[in-house]
Amino acid sequence: MSDLLRSYLTVAIFGAAAVLMAFTMFGVARVLRPQRPTPQKLIAYESGVDPVGSDWTQSQIRYYVFAVLFVLFDVEAVFIFPWATRLDVYALFGLVEMAIFIFILVLGLFYAWRKGVLRWV
Amino acid sequence: MTDLLGLAYWAETSIKLGVALIVIPTAALMLGYLFLLKMMAFMQSRLGPQDVGPYGTLQLIADAVKFLQKEDIHPAAADRRVFRAAPVVVLASSFLLFVVLPTGPDAVVENLDTGIFYAMAVSSLSVLGVLMAGWASANKYALLGGLRAAGQLIAYELPLILAVMGVVIQADSLNLQQIVRAQAEGEIFGFGLIGNPFILTQFVGFLIFMIAAQAELTQTPFDMPVAETELVGGFHVEYTGFRFLLFFMAEVATAFAFSALATVMFLGGWWIPGFDFDAPVLNVLGPVVMLVKILLVAFIIFWIRFTYPRLREDQLQKFAWKVLIPLSLANIVVTGIFKVVL
């Protein structure tokens, strides 16, 4: 196995260990804890009064436009990472290229701002 | 790089896993006791826990035992499988963060080349767990809390990533060991005795990183997702016993990991001025230095938490998009100009 794959094998082992640890704790808790469910205990908690309406209510997700913007800027971050590690090699050429790239993105952000997308609606 | 003691891969990984399984809960307990119990108490003119162990040091262990004995309640309407899986996802996310944290020239679980990129990717996994918990609980407060958390975490993910970029430009690497090395071998105007901790050149980046980390950890002033007074705890309202404890543990452990990341990237990491970068003795002294710096950074995080009131949801979004993101983009360009031209 190559070193690269092996180093990510460690990551996988750690992920598995975390899951295993959680389940071991659940196992220990299962032995120690009481289990006496009553119908009143199992209704949704709404500060002590009986729940009103259905459990999954409609709620307005006010920031879904932010989420679209986020995808945009996150992709941008993916582009900037390799550029940032190799800036020494690209030197002035890379700097100008990235300045233009970021300028266009800022223009986009500014456009969204002026359009009122960044306002809480 | 990885053969610390010259052992085979499996033996070495088992040892590292064993150490990590001790270090991570200990780190969480330590931060919880020092800051959440004692420091908060002193800042509010209380004494905090006193009875369990000397100065109440064993209070959190007593609490953990108490949580183990609590009944595990699944609300009847909950989506059982997702409800059960959510705390595990959050815990795994903070656990995986510890894989890349370097504490000495060889004292690191796995020195991944993608280092900081990996850390950012893994830390954003916890959003998934929080959203799962909020949705699966079938509770209005939990759903609102989960949605708020998702909105907040994606808004502050960007400044966090972009603030890191300045450090990456200066160090020419994503690898956390290389970032420490770049700081150890750096010079301040030709004066190289203490290296060049990037907080000096990247103080704007450090500021943005700390603010964004505060929001990612959902600590006050950015704690709307778990606001007790309006959402009675947000996404974890319906969790009882050990599942609740997992959320709590993951939160504190992630605070520890983020403080460690800030230490590695901005405060010079485990390197001690005057030592060779590869000196084996740093494998012993490095973790101690790291711990001191981590506690310092964590102190700032919790200090802010106990001092400021909660922001409003729209103020929070506005601050991220209109202040932090433009500022961090400007920071990248300015750092690039300094790197290439000067």
Image: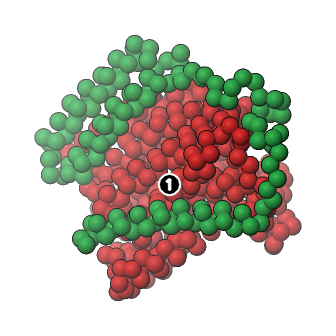
Chain colours: A green, B red
* Residue A55 position in % (x across, y down): 68, 30
Image quadrant in which the N terminus of chain B is located: bottom left
Identify residue for label 1: B93
Q: Nearer the viewer, residue B79 or B334?
A: B79
Residue at (44, 23) in percent of width and height: A65
- Taking the view exactly as shown, the residue that stands out farthest to the top is A115
> Is B40 placed left or right of A76 in the picture?
right
* Residue B286 position in % (x across, y down): 47, 74
Residue at (51, 43) in percent of width and height: B127
Kindly state the secondary structure of the residue where label 1 is placed: helix
- Taking the view exactly as shown, the residue that stands out farthest to the right is B51
Report the chain holding disc 1: B
Label 1 neighbour load within 10 Å: few <14, some 14-19, many 20+: many
> Is B171 placed left or right of B86 in the picture?
left
Indicate the quadrant where residue A31 lies: bottom right
Q: Nearer the viewer, residue B242 or B159?
A: B242
> Is B342 placed left or right of A115 in the picture?
left
Residue type pointed to by label 1: Ser
Q: Is residue A26 visible?
A: yes
Residue B30 lies, with reference to residue B199, above or below; the image says below
